[in-house]
Image: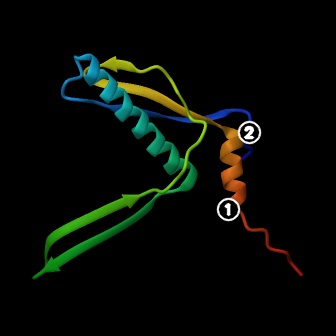
Amino acid sequence: RVMNVNAPTGTTGEGTDPSIDTAQGKLKARRAAELDGMRKLAEQIYGLQISSNTMVRDFITEYDEVMSQVEAVIRGAITSEPRFADGVATVTVSIQGADVWRVVHSQVQIVERR
């Protein structure tokens, strides 16, 4: 697959707040949407680590736990103006393809064949 390094890579983030009808609630919902979008963007670029733990006793599941984690530094992300509908703020978070390529390229190991 060919990547256009000049095209932005992006995703949509959503957030809400119990007091979304107030100015402060709108700001908090917007920030939650931005963080959700950046988390999704980090998952796309850096990948997502998933771990799970299940406890079974007498053939009955006592608990089932699934955890996910992503660690990333995102610089230069662009966030659209928020859209508010049905108590949810939605934003688009994007980053230039060239910035994504730098991350991918730094993780690629070149192996020399002999």
- Choose top left, top right, bottom left or bottom right for residue 52: bottom left
Residue occupying image coordinates x 71% and y 63%: 108
Which residue is at the front of the view, 12 or 80? Answer: 80
Which residue is at the front of the view, 63 or 36? Answer: 36
**How has the structure been colored for display?**
rainbow
Residue occupying image coordinates x 25% and y 65%: 65
Question: Are there few (<14), some (14-19), or many (20+) residues within 10 Å of tag 1?
Answer: few
Quick check: 88 above or below 49?
Answer: above
Q: CA distance from mark 2 to mark 1?
A: 17 Å
Local secondary structure at mark 2:
loop
Question: Are there few (<14), some (14-19), or many (20+) residues within 10 Å of tag 2?
Answer: some
Query: Which of the labelled discs sits on residue 19, or is there none?
Result: none
Quick check: 108 above or below 73?
Answer: below
Query: Which of the labelled discs sits on residue 5, or is there none?
Result: 2
CB atoms of marks 2 and 1 within 8 Å: no
What type is the residue that disc 2 sits on?
Answer: Val
Whichever of labels 2 and 1 marks the residue nearer the N terminus, that label is 2
Quick check: 7 above or below 61?
Answer: above
Residue at the front extreme of this rendering: 24
Q: Indicate the position of residue 102 as horizontal and vertical percent values.
A: 71, 50
- Look at mark 1 in the image and give the residue it sits on: 107
Q: Indicate the position of residue 17 as horizontal and vertical percent values.
A: 24, 29
Horizontal relation, residue 61 to residue 70: left or right: left
Residue occupying image coordinates x 57% and y 35%: 77
What type is the residue that disc 1 sits on?
Answer: Gln
Q: How many marks?
A: 2
